Amino acid sequence: MFGDWFKIYFIENDGMAYGMKLFGGGKVGKLILTLFRIVVSIVGFWCLLKSIKNNAHWGLRLSLSLVLAGALGNIIDSVFYGVIYAAENQYIGGWFEGQVVDMFYAPLWEGHLPEWLPLWGGQFFVFFSPIWNFADACITVGVAVMIMGQNSFFSKDSIEMAFGSSKISKQSAPIEPENTEESANDIPSDSPQ
């Protein structure tokens, strides 16, 4: 697309990021991964709604939206892809056994490493070789925004504003005993009366 630097491929990824597989892959691994994605998305959606309702920092709302959009994109692929394309490819699974389609390849650097480098000297090396999709980019950018803005997004005041008031408030501070006449008479003093 942009010379040799940015290429578009068609890769069916039946695992997680970078092709890693949960429990060695297979139907059980895909099912657990898809259910995990769904649960995390439900929690993420709840957090996003709370942050919008409580007018949290715009950066937190943006980053949560990006992560949630990316997660939903990957869920759609992993839930429906196997059913939609099963007629074309007998090796694709059914419901919740689909694959995520990855297509973007943008290596940051390709070349031979210097000969003097121990172990890998002279070998061809590609820096950032994963193939990814738009959903992965949304998740990555959303998490990066959260990390860069954590001091603003996750201060005590921001958390209370985003997700409601804290359980610990000034009203729940330790209660000092009241000074009544009865309690004053019960306390022995060193001076004679």
Image (tube, rainbow, N blue to C red):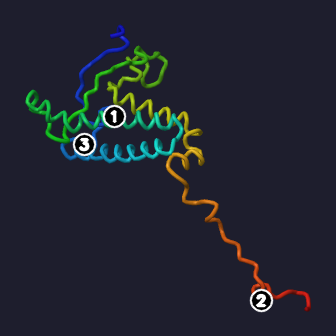
Q: Amino acid at mark 1?
A: Ala
Q: Residue furthest bottom?
A: 193
The reply, left or right, for residue 193 in relation to residue 97 is right
The percent position of residue 116, horizontal first and vertical second, equals: 49, 18
Pick the front one: 52 or 159: 52
Q: Amino acid at mark 3?
A: Gly
Numbered circle sitting on residue 186: 2
Q: How many other residues sit within 10 Å of disc 2, few (<14), some (14-19) or many (≥20)?
A: few
> Relative to residue 102, is residue 160 depicted above or below?
below
Secondary structure beneath disc 3?
helix
* Quadrant in the rendering for residue 67: top left
Count every numbered label the image shows and give the total: 3
Say which residue appears at 36% left-offset and 9% top-offset.
Answer: 2
Question: Which circle, 3 or 1, is nearer the viewer?
Answer: 1
Pick the front one: 168 or 17: 168
Return the residue at label 3.
24
Tags 2 and 1 in contact by the CB under 8 Å rule? no
The reply, left or right, for residue 84 in relation to residue 185 is left
Q: Quadrant of the N terminus?
A: top left
Q: Amino acid at mark 2?
A: Asp
Say which residue appears at 24% left-offset and 33% top-offset.
Answer: 77
**For the residues marked 2 and 1, what is the alpha-carbon distance in whole angstroms?**
70 Å
Secondary structure beneath disc 1?
helix
Q: How many other residues sit within 10 Å of disc 3, few (<14), some (14-19) or many (≥20)?
A: few
**For the residues marked 2 and 3, what is the alpha-carbon distance in whole angstroms?**
72 Å
Question: Which circle, 2 or 1, is nearer the viewer?
Answer: 2
> Relative to residue 156, is residue 102 depicted above or below?
above
Question: Which circle, 2 or 3, is nearer the viewer?
Answer: 2
Q: Quadrant of the C terminus?
A: bottom right
Mark 2 / mark 1, whichever is N-terminal: 1
* Quadrant in the rendering for residue 189: bottom right
Secondary structure beneath disc 2?
helix
